[in-house]
Image (spheres, rainbow, N blue to C red):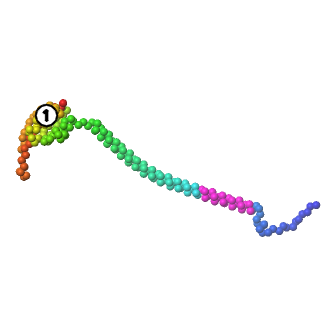
Amino acid sequence: MLRFNFAEVKESTFEKYLKPDVFFLVLVILGAFSVEIFLENSIKSQIEATRQKIREFQAEKRRLRKIQSIEKNLTAKKRELEEKLKVVTKLDRRRLVPKPLYFFSSKENMKGVWLNELKLSSKRVYVNGNIWNIKEFPTFLKKVENSIGNVKFKQTKRVDYENREVNLKVHFYNFEFEAEQK
C-alpha cells in the first residue's frame, strides 16, 4: 500500500536559500568573472608589450633617419670628391712638362744664372736671363745645346747696377738666345 506524507519538511534557512541551482549559478558567474578578468589582464599585457615595441620601433626609426641623413651627406660629398678626382685625373693625364723646363730647373745647370724670361713654343725656346761671370756663359750655352738643341745666339750686354743708399755696385751680364728643340 502506498503512503503519502503530506507533512511539511522543515528546511533550515541555509538550505532554503542555497539550493543546488543557485549554488551552481553563483559558481558559473564567478567563473565567468574570473575568465573575464584573466582575459582583460592578458589583453592589457599584450597592449603594453605592443606599445613597448612601438616605442622601440620609433626609436629605431629616428636612429635610421639620422643615419639616412648622414648617408645623404656622405653620398653628396662622395660625388663631389669623385668629380674633383675626375678633374685631377684628367689634368694629370694631360699634364706634359716640356723637356726644357727640366733643364732650367736643375741647380747644376743654372749655377750663377737666373732667368728673366722663358718662352716655349712647339719647336723653339726663347731665353732671356742674367749671368754673373761672362766666362761661364759659353759653358752654359754648350749645356743648353747638348740638352735642348741648336742655339741661335742673339746678344749679351753688361749691366751695371748701383745703389747709392747702401753704396753697392754690381756688374752682371744680360743675355738672350733661342734654341731649336731636338
Picture residue at 30% right of the left edge, 39% below the top: 89
- Residue 87 at what x, y percent from top left? 30, 40
SS under mark 1: helix
Q: Quadrant of residue 16?
A: bottom right
Q: Which residues are magenta?
A: 23-43
| Viewer-closest of 56 and 152 | 152
Residue 32 falls left or right of residue 102: right
Amino acid at dot 1: Lys
Q: Residue at x 13, y 42 (%)?
A: 112
Of 155 and 55, which appears nearest the observer? Answer: 155
Q: Main secondary structure of the magenta part?
A: helix
Q: Is residue 175 visible?
A: no
Residue 143 in magenta? no
Viewer-side residue, 65 vs 127: 127
Compared to residue 51, the image places residue 79 above or below, namely above
Say which quadrant the C terminus sits in: top left
Instruction: Please give the residue where the numbered disc 1 appears in the rendered image.
Output: 142
Toward the viewer: 21 or 83?
83
Residue 50 in the figure: left or right of residue 165: right
Residue at the far right in the pictured view = 1
- 94 sits left or right of 104 in the view: right
Q: Position of residue 94 (x, y in %)?
A: 27, 36
Name above or below for residue 19 compared with residue 142.
Answer: below
Q: Position of residue 138 (x, y in %)?
A: 10, 35
Which residue is painted at 76% across and 65% down in the image? 18
- Left or right, 115 with reference to 7: left
